[in-house]
Image (cartoon, helix red, strand yellow):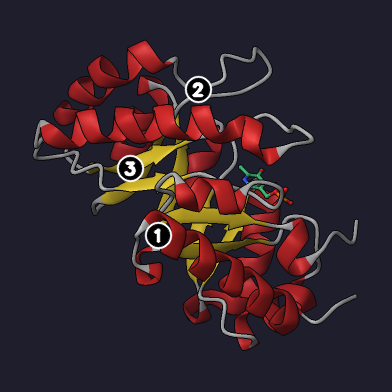
Amino acid sequence: MVAVRENLMEIQADIEQAAEKAGRNKEDIHIIAVTKYVTIERAQEAVSAGVTNLGENRDEGFLAKYKELRDRACWHFIGSLQSRKVKDIIHHVDYIHSLDRYSLAKEINKRSQKTVPCFVQVNVSGEESKHGLAEEEVESFIKDLAALEHIRVVGLMTMAPHVDNPEDTRPLFKKMRLLRDHIQKQNFHHAPCDYLSMGMSNDYQVAVEEGATHIRIGTRLVGKEF
Ligand SMILES: *Cc1c(COP(=O)(O)O)cnc(C)c1O
């Protein structure tokens, strides 16, 4: 497998180019290495290569990597989260990217003693297989979250459908940015909503051009081992 360091340098160059094209600051774009397909050793290699954000989509994988790497990384939970699993991960996560229902928010709120930065997941493509709220549900959902003292909505997250031509995802990313801007403008105390978590291995350049602040990259950065 190609060294993580090499992949990272290429991805950083792509980001720089996309950011420049869009008139953005490259410092505003955070790479999250998604390690769900790889071993703990490969995750360690990523951290040694300078990756500071790690993401996992299942609690088992999350805890396995967390146990080894702990303070060496900032921890993102990016997959759909069952309420009964919240207590297992809540004291170790720095960000949850998959907040998609009030019952889950209530459980997070109950299990945490401190503020939990969350992204609200949006199903912007409307595909039935995708998790997340419909675009038109997002605002009232976020308003309801004001009642939960430990929930802070730092941004919106989406997973675009896999398409052959990443350009096809551009309208969805654009829609996400407009929705983020709309929420942000309302200055909700519990929901600054500054961030946009979108873009994966096949479409991160387009996502950055359209305003992504957090891109979640697995295959292209650390590879796929199992
Ligand atoms: C797996 C996964 C990714 C990364 O996917 P790649 O295509 O391998 O980059 C990003 N986000 C989520 C939510 C995932 O589950």
Q: Nearer the viewer, mark 2 or mark 3?
A: 2
* Cα–Cα span, label 2 and label 1: 25 Å
x and y percent of residue 211 in the render? 40, 48
Mark whose residue sits in front, 2 or 1: 2
User: How far, Cα to Cα, is label 2 from label 3?
Assistant: 14 Å
Q: Residue tagged by mark 2?
A: 124
Up-down: is 100 above or below 150? above
Q: Which residue is mark 3?
A: 155
Residue on which the image places disc 1:
94
Q: Could you give the CA–CA distance between mark 1 and mark 3, rounded to whole angstroms?
A: 14 Å
- Name the element at disc 3: strand
Mark 1 and 3 residues: CB-CB less than 8 Å, in contact? no
- Please identify the quadrant where the C terminus is shown: bottom right
Kind of residue sitting beneath label 1: Asp
For image coordinates 22% across by 43% down, the residue present is 150
Which residue is located at x 24 percent, y 35 percent?
181
Compared to residue 166, the image places residue 43 above or below, namely: below
Q: Residue 198, how many percent across, how many down?
A: 51, 44
In this image, 173 relative to 139: left or right?
A: right
